[in-house]
Amino acid sequence: AQKITQTQPGMFVQEKEAVTLDCTYDTSDPSYGLFWYKQPSSGEMIFLIYQGSYDQQNATEGRYSLNFQKARKSANLVISASQLGDSAMYFCAMREGWPGGGADGLTFGKGTHLIIQP
Amino acid sequence: DTGVSQDPRHKITKRGQNVTFRCDPISEHNRLYWYRQTLGQGPEFLTYFQNEAQLEKSRLLSDRFSAERPKGSFSTLEIQRTEQGDSAMYLCASSRTSGRADEQFFGPGTRLTVL
């Protein structure tokens, strides 16, 4: 079974609109971390935001926020006021046994290709 | 503050040849990760070092793959007897033990093409 599922292969959004990128995850570990990365056409992965499984509040970083619904095992990324420079691939990732243990690498989803239109 | 660097950025080789990639992490980071990314997929974890110790290896890392991190600084990933299926982007990331999220910072990657 897929540990990270991103159901939107591609999205087109008008500039300045808010956009939600979906991510669901599967784990039986009570401790885990969820990450979102942006990958522009240049190829470099850029860290955006982190949510720990024990965090009481949804994470926010500037225009990025994470809509964390633990019971539904979903961790959607919300980008407010989208900009042309937001066009990129976006990956959701999970790290099990974190914090407090677990040194494995991240497990990534297949990504969503976001295109912002002027 | 320099980021993670990787060399070379591109490598074209013939099937059966050996290739070696280098990764220089962010200087204060003690953890180093290697990932492989094929077209249309997210990165897949290959292996992980804490300082010079290799602590985790994925099933994806066949016997043809070997990674080292001498002295806990830069790391090398070698692929012996390359196959066409090895064609991918090889990404290196580093992080430090402290920090709540231990977020991994990625390098620009080495794109390998095996002919």
Image: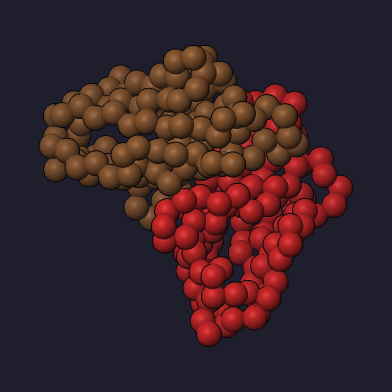
Please give the name of the residue rendered at 56% of the width and 78% of the height, measured from the top-left corner: A13
Please give the name of the residue rendered at 60% of the width and 49% of the height, measured from the top-left corner: A47
The residue at the far front in this view is: B1
**Is residue A12 visible to us here?**
yes
Q: Quadrant of residue B87?
A: top left
Counting the numbered discs, the total is: 0
Q: Is residue A80 left or right of residue A89?
A: right
The residue at the far right in this view is: A56
Q: Is residue B77 left or right of residue A92?
A: left
Residue B80 on image: x %, y %: 23, 24
Residue B104 on image: x %, y %: 59, 39
Q: Indicate the quadrant containing the N terminus of chain B: top left, top right, bottom left or bottom right.
A: top right
The residue at the far bottom in this view is: A118
Q: Indicate the quadrant containing the C terminus of chain B: top left, top right, bottom left or bottom right.
A: top left
Q: Quadrant of residue B11?
A: top left
Q: Is residue A10 above or below residue B14?
A: below
Q: Quadrant of residue B21?
A: top left
**Is residue A29 visible to us here?**
no
Please give the name of the residue rendered at 34% of the width and 52% of the height, measured from the top-left corner: B39
Shade representing chain B: brown
Residue A116 on image: x %, y %: 53, 76
Chain displayed in red: A
Q: Is residue A24 left or right of residue B64?
A: right
